[in-house]
Amino acid sequence: MHEFHYRGNKLYCEGVEISRIAEKFGTPLYIYSRKTLSDHYRKIAQAFRSLKPLICFSVKANSNLAVLKVLANLGAGMDVVSGGELYQALKAGAAPKKIVYAGVGKSKSEIAQAVREGILFFNVESLPELALIDQVAGQLHKKVNVCLRINPDINPHTHRFITTGRVLNKFGLDMQTAEDIFLRRSIFSNLNLIGLHIHIGSQITEPKPFVQAIKKALRLITRLKNSHVALKYFNIGGGLGIVYHREHPQTAKEFAAAVLGLLQGTGLKVILEPGRFIAGNSGILVTRVVYIKKTEHKDFAIVDAGMNDLIRPALYDAYHEILPVIKTSRPADQPTSRPKYDIVGPICESADFLAKDRILPNLQAGNLLAVMGAGAYGFTMSSNYNSRLRTCEILVEGKRFFLVRKRETYRDLIRQQIIPRNLR
């Protein structure tokens, strides 16, 4: 559930008309519901309350400081994958001891940054990375906590680009290599190898892949325990799916019911890393129709948002529901009179579309459209392609709304660029 709904013919976010926000700040723009963010975090916390887990929001899903602050205020930790995300999490008030650091390509400077900040631990993806963290920790005279990420070779039945737990993916260590590292852990004198991490993918709508991955990890945990390797943490990752179209994803309660029995007997502190589940349906992208282009084959609604604003349809062929911000009065019992549109942007790419073959009311220039389910992997994946300005972001709280990111200006486009003196 989320807090975007119609009152009469007008789409609202919580207690605020979407059109009112668009008129004040222009389009395109992202709008987030504080209540939806909070409610979805609480759903996971409630479902897993018997374990008292650490819930680390996946910052890559939505890194806006206000969004992170809402979650940090609720007690959330943060799952980061870069020095920039670590910086943002700390700026938003996340406690360093609630931050876990994942990602396959951590640089020496990023590792040093995290060690100095005193994060909870690193999720380590490879033996060379483990050696580098050990080296940096020694140089900084620190003892650093580490969890090994294993690759359980589980098919999560999701899009191939967001599958992360198969042997052909770049993520994690195979089970035997991970076990060998734990058994030879004494050679890493500056590290505490204290846990195991799994993350098999994103937008996973059924519990079975999670259960399979956890069972594989538990077998390794048992072998390590028998070899007198004492672990403290079991990080089961994230990846819970949401409703974009016709999906029927598991609820937080259903997910918990499927895995709690496996986790309760371990004696380990459980960590979860949800991102999309919390943020996905907490946000929308609002765009305005610029032109209606009619051709012999189809009609195009050309809007002012493009693949630089929301790349998921182009990258994953992802489906996002498109809703009119203000409904027309056309009777609902006349579906044949409702045309099909491709909703396309201004970018010079054929892949620049937000939706295809959508039945919508007769559109005209100036109409506002809401691209639903855009709160995760929306703005964070946006770019300045075609020298387009990245949009602003708004947070709604009840009947109030706040600008939480300013729209870029042309000056921002060239702020870091330098014309060499010999070209002047």
Image (cartoon, rainbow, N blue to C red):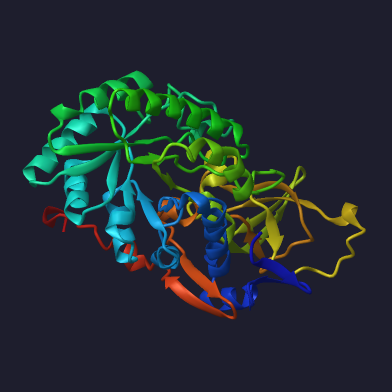
- Left or right relative to 48: residue 390: left
Residue at coordinates 50% horizontally, 70% vertically from top-left? 394
Give the percent coordinates (x, y) of residue 20.
Answer: 61, 78
Residue at coordinates 90% horizontally, 64% vertically from top-left? 331
Whether residue 135 is visible to the viewer of this picture, yes or no, is: yes
> Quick check: 133 above or below 32?
above
Give the percent coordinates (x, y) of residue 190.
Answer: 13, 38
> Quick check: 22 above or below 420?
below
* Among the 4 quarters of the image, the one containing residue 42: bottom right
* Between 172 and 391, the one nearer to me in the picture: 172
Whether residue 307 is visible to the viewer of this picture, yes or no, is: no
Image mark count: 0
Q: Residue furthest top?
A: 176
> Quick check: 208 above or below 65?
above
* Among the 4 quarters of the image, the one containing residue 97: bottom left
* Between 293 and 283, the one nearer to me in the picture: 283
Where the N terminus falls, by quadrant? bottom right
Give the percent coordinates (x, y) of residue 34.
Answer: 53, 69
Residue at coordinates 50% horizontally, 71% vertically from top-left? 395
Give the percent coordinates (x, y) of residue 116.
Answer: 16, 53
Where the C terminus falls, by quadrant? bottom left
* Between 34 and 218, the one nearer to me in the picture: 218
